[in-house]
Amino acid sequence: MLKKLTIISILTLVFFSFNFASAGGEIKILPNNPLYVFKDLGRKIQDFFTFDTAKKIKLRLNVAEEKLQEIEQMVKDNPNNSNYDKYLKKYEDSVKQVQGKVNELPGEIKDKLLDVLASKMIGHESRLENLKYSMQDTTKDTLDKIKDTVFDKYTEISLKMTSEENFINKIKDQFQSITDDSISRIQNEASGNFKKIVDKVLGSDDQNEELLNKVNRDVEEMGLTMDDILETISLFTEEDMASLEQFARDILSGKKSEKDTDQVDLSADAFLKIEALAEIAILNNAIRYCEEEGFEVEDKKYCVSKEGEKCDVLDFFSQICSF
């Protein structure tokens, strides 16, 4: 009798939970509802009894989608809920569950799933970004970390199903449907494996290499070294560093060119440090001249002849003194 009652109770609970889980599409039962535990239980039961790999992955993707919809609905009703950190982490956990045995899927199913994943990655990025404007500042930090984890996980799953080149093309297709500002934000904020994919989608790897080669040539022509430049920049304030970084990104994206350097918003102190590089360049050229003449340089100050005679390196360069 007890065994029969237990089975009936389990079946009732399963039926009850399935009904709560199926209500997910309507987003009526939210995480702040005491009955939400049954909705989550229903999802777990559905997952347990779904044996087909493709269907299980689709189910888990739907759960992740529902959890994000639930958060969006709650934020709309009350942006100051103190439990949003917890709800966001539940969404993050649901994304981590998507993986499954994706490598066992047939080719045509993998391709369809890749389209879905790429679409969700870009779509969820925009929706999570919108949530930031409605949430408390403390929750925004959590949201940014979760964004990184979610996109890294989706990237990891995708690369298990296809080549990097194919996945890059999928993301490139998704970029066709969003604004340039959104693409720029994604590129600036992406991290990990997803960052590498985005950079390759936008051709940033080639651009960065080309820009770096040009910078090296320009630096050498100015009589400076990369160490001179980096040492000077390291003394800049965070605000000046941010302005320089943004200007560099604008050049890479084609929004600005080197002719627009007068538009860089730097402090007076930063400009003084940049002007000081001119003196370093003169000294570097003087040192190089001394060495090219076959003499040694001592302490970056003296040009020394083979007989041990010393001459101020700048004076030697200006031919005020000679050997």
Image (cartoon, rainbow, N blue to C red):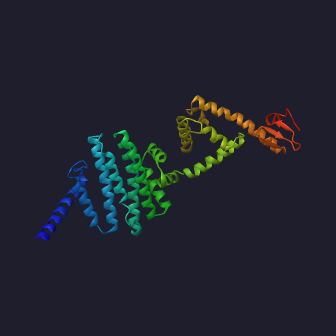
Q: Is residue 132 visible?
A: no
Please provide percent x and percent y for residue 234. Answer: 59, 39
Q: Residue at x 32, y 69 (%)?
A: 52
Q: Quadrant of the C terminus?
A: top right
Quarter-of-image position of residue 322: top right
Q: Looking at the image, how many numbered discs can be counted on the residues?
A: 0
Q: Is residue 252 above or below residue 158?
A: above
Quarter-of-image position of residue 320: top right
Residue farthest left in this picture: 1
Q: Nearer the viewer, residue 142 or 308?
A: 308
Q: Nearer the viewer, residue 41 or 69?
A: 41
Q: Residue at x 77, y 40 (%)?
A: 287
Q: Nearer the viewer, residue 225 or 106?
A: 225
Q: Is residue 45 visible?
A: yes
Please provide percent x and percent y for residue 146. Answer: 39, 50
Please provide percent x and percent y for residue 225. Answer: 69, 43
Please provide percent x and percent y for residue 204. Answer: 55, 50
Q: Residue at x 48, y 61 (%)?
A: 166
Quarter-of-image position of residue 44: bottom left
In the displayed structure image, the side of residue 229 where residue 178 appears, left or right: left
In the displayed structure image, the side of residue 73 where residue 139 appears, left or right: right
Q: Is residue 187 above or below residue 93?
A: above
Q: Residue at x 41, y 63 (%)?
A: 111
Q: Quadrant of the N terminus?
A: bottom left
